[in-house]
Amino acid sequence: MTTVIFVDSRMRTSGTDSDFEVDLRESIHLSNARLRIDNLTFADSFFTTDAGRHLYFSDGAGGLTVASIAEGAYTGMGLAAAIQTATGRTTTYDALTNSIAHTLAAADQGWLKDVELAAYSTGFPSGSSPQRPLSLNAVLGDGANDATQVVWRFVRMSPYNYLFLKSSRLRCVDHHGPRGTHSDLCMVPLTGGTGAQVAASTPDGVYYDLQGEQSIKGFDLILCDYLGNPVDLRGRPLACQITIE
């Protein structure tokens, strides 16, 4: 027998539009069941700064210097201007190469990648940490320091290329997410830019086997990045169709 559940985050029992609980009026018994996700849709409401808005530099004495830009959805030129305002140092955007060049305070005060920040224990803004620095590096990408400047060679304005819809209750067998978990139900490419309506489904003809035998009266859904962090839909709803056989 096929069971279809239509989900709208506005009808959630708790949580937010991207991380919520759904209660069912009747329990569903699952035995050797499999599922697929169809018609997953939401608005791309993501800002350039959603994965982080901090820039980290060495202070030349074993510590950190931090500059933070305002939250927002930027263009390349706008992002360069925001970095210049936050640091007080010349920053330029090259539209031909989609790169940003930023003047360093000194040769020994270079820009720091996220992997380098793991070596620091103090100096992080409130809410950030060595393990989760909430830096701008997701959009700035790979950069190279020289004696006078850092150049980010190819920037992007969205912090995410794709997202995942996952559930801790609807876990699948032989199904491995980026972190090796079994909770990811659907991969969601983001191709339209801020404001576009996003649509995704499980590939045609594909079902995922659910783990074990269980009866459910509700379940959770989370729209998250590859690290499992829920994203911010800014009050815009998420909807999908879950088909269980």
Image: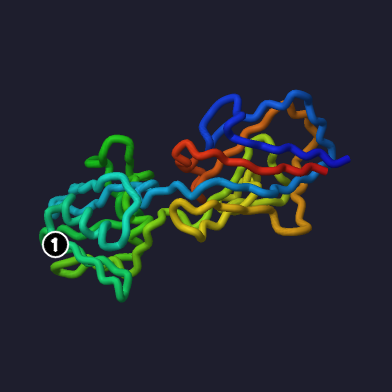
Decide which of 8, 212 is in the foreground and name it: 8
- Image coordinates of residue 131 in percent, x first then y, are 37, 44
Q: Give the colouring mode of the picture.
A: rainbow
- Image coordinates of residue 15 in percent, x first then y, are 53, 29
The residue that disc 1 covers is 90
Amino acid type at mark 1: Thr
Q: Is residue 245 above or below residue 106?
A: above
Q: Quadrant of the N terminus?
A: top right
Q: Residue at x 13, y 51 (%)?
A: 61
Decide which of 113, 169 is in the foreground and name it: 169
Q: Is residue 54 above or below residue 9?
A: below
- Of all residues, the one furthest to the bottom in this rendering is 96
Q: Is residue 238 left or right of residue 193?
A: right
Residue 23, picture quadrant: top right
- Image coordinates of residue 243 in percent, x first then y, are 76, 44
Residue 102, picture quadrant: bottom left
Decide which of 163, 227 is in the foreground and name it: 163
Badge count: 1
Q: Quadrant of the C terminus?
A: top right
Q: Residue at x 78, y 58 (%)?
A: 205
- Image coordinates of residue 51 in percent, x first then y, are 39, 48
Q: Is residue 102 left or right of residue 178?
A: left
Q: Residue at x 74, y 59 (%)?
A: 204
- Of all residues, the one furthest to the right in this rendering is 1
Q: Secondary structure at mark 1?
A: loop
Q: Is residue 226 left or right of residue 5?
A: left
Mark 1 closeness class: few <14, some 14–19, many ≥20 residues within 10 Å: some
